[in-house]
Amino acid sequence: MTTVLFKKELLENWRNKKWIWVPLVFILLAIMDPITNYYLPEILDAVGGIDGAVIELPDFSPADAIMMSVSQYSTLGVLVTVLLSMGAISSERKSGVLDLVLVKPVSYTKFVVTKWLSLLSLIWSSFIIGMLASWYYTVLLYGEIPFTMLLAVIFYYGLWLTFICTISIFYNTLTHSPGLVAFLTIGTTLVISLLTSLFGTRTAWSPANLSTHLQELLITGDVPSALIYSAIVSILLIILILFASIYSFKQVLHNRNE
Amino acid sequence: MGILSITALSKKFNDSYAVKNMDYQFTPHQCIALIGPNGAGKTTTLRMIAGLLKPTSGNIIFEQNKNIDRRTLIGYLPQHPVFYPWMTGSEFLTYSGQLGGLSKSTSRKRCEELLDIVGIIDVKDKRISSYSGGMKQRLGIAQAMVHKPKLLMLDEPVSSLDPIGRREVLTLMEVLKKEMTILFSTHILSDADEISDELILLRNGEIIESGKIKELRQKYQTTKITLQFAERQTFYEEKIATLANVRNTLVEKDSIQVIANDITKARNEILQRAVQEDWPLLTFRLEQASLEEMFMKAVNHS
Amino acid sequence: MLEVIESINWSLVAPFIVIQFILMIIGLVDWAKTKQTNGPRWMWLFIIIFLNIIGPILYFIFGRRE
Ligand SMILES: Nc1ncnc2c1ncn2[C@@H]1O[C@H](COP(=O)(O)OP(=O)(O)OP(=O)(O)O)[C@@H](O)[C@H]1O
Ligand SMILES: [Mg+2]
């Protein structure tokens, strides 16, 4: 049954071309800043600088270059992810097609989990491809960085993206308005990030700190313990929210009033 | 043994009842028509039985197989079915079958079969987004019965079909009845009259009359005899009124309506007298009230 | 200015431009195939062509009617 549901999701995302444009967008996001920053000195030179003023540009390390990609993902990448996933379940409920699916003996749990897996497979694939592109340009333009570092970035930052996808799926089970799902998901992410920076070191374990800790890892080459904590907390929260999504989906359907 | 029984089923929206205190026993292999004007509560009833709407109170009990998912027993066509527009008809139907528990190959086979039966085999590989309303209706009927449910529920299955389509679907339902119980809603009485065995008349969310169509006919039967005479109408009217089996007579402009206690006896009596006394009889007509009249009568009674 | 253009290693930048181009083409093909979009159809044509990167993304997320 899960395979049947999953294949339908694959086919849908193939027909609406998500499997083409999302990876492309993730590649663009990843390589945009490393390339522009590399050519920035020449470009500024050409415009003539500002009347003899000497422009000091920081020398970027390979680690900085990788973090440029990550920082693009933290803003535009997250935005694209949220907009992509806002209708995962809610739009099917809104249109009414879910009625035809759910009068068949489909397990609600499997339904939600499949939606989640399908979203994750798209986001993770695109993210991995994007980071590989980023790594390629980094090595080419800024110097060597171990492949294991790249894997670490993919794993830990992937957790943050997974976290956001899971929140989106959760809101998808609550409402049938995709716009509201996007709004709530972005709102929740912002609040978490805000609280995390507000409480400083006391919330070092927050999922929102994954990228900060990653930066430390890239610079020092050692895995900071806070990164491990953040990862564990993220995984636990992801599992928790996923269960909450299943529960809320069942509740919402069970108490349907329209 | 029944297949499904509903007891004291009610659904309240805001402060008004859409369905109120409904009781019914569904017997297998019957075709049951849910009839009522707009807003009577037909869709609400069907959605509750399908599990798409939570009843405010009351029970819906499937008699057999208490421990299996009741959704395996039912097929449902919504009043306005919506599909995945990016799928083709045949893809959607195969998918539905698989969700209904069929294997991929069985579902494929069944899908071909059904598309042919409901008459959209020609457009099976076109995207559903390009389907007409009637084609969607047909696809909707096909997906409802793809997994051979015990109870097939159709919400106005023929409302958006052309006359030929209507005929096809009604014929199909007649055939399906042998395999499953069919519960369908309509506000067209002649459709119900044609294929259903039982009727449930709904008004304002309440059952105002229900039962076997034959029994209902008998109950509301007002068979009457209409007579026309060439002359002296009132004279004959008085004569007829004295006959033993005549309950009531009524003179209209140029005819006499006779309501009988026993229609056969009254008929014989009148005809005998007419022959014996050489009545100038122009018309002699036996009329049976249509379902339409019965419907109006039931609605007015309560 | 010419120096800059010469100094840029085009084989490095090419993928960036090619991907943008592919994105636009896919957007255009999809646009050409659909009969209905959310909002005026021609507006999306301009958005896809004239807004770099963002245009096709906007179209895929908001313009397609599913
Ligand atoms: N989601 C809802 N919220 C509030 N009221 C509702 C809702 N759904 C139905 N109703 C009300 O319940 C009553 C019954 O509606 P229902 O759709 O069951 O009627 P119906 O018999 O199917 O009518 P039709 O022949 O028009 O399809 C109506 O008065 C309707 O206004
Ligand atoms: Mg209705």
Image (cartoon, coloured by chain):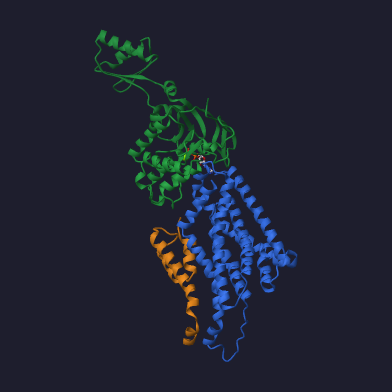
Q: Residue at x 60, y 90 (%)?
A: A53
Q: Nearer the viewer, residue C29 or B246?
A: C29
Q: Which chain is orange?
A: C
Using residue B83 as the reference point, say whether residue A243 is left or right of it. Answer: right
Q: Residue at x 42, y 35 (%)?
A: B187
Question: In the orientation shown, which residue stands out farthest toward the right?
Answer: A202
Q: Which chain is green?
A: B
What percent of the width, then of the height, locates residue B208?
49, 29
Q: Residue at x 66, y 68 (%)?
A: A214
Q: Nearer the viewer, residue B126 or A19?
A: A19
What percent of the width, then of the height, locates residue A116?
57, 54
Q: Nearer the viewer, residue B36 or A148?
A: A148
Q: Residue at x 56, y 51 (%)?
A: A114
**Residue B35 makes an appearance in the image:** no
What percent of the width, then of the height, locates residue B256?
32, 19
Q: Which chain is blue?
A: A
Q: From this view, report whether residue A161 is shown above or below residue A110.
A: below
**Residue B114 makes an appearance in the image:** yes
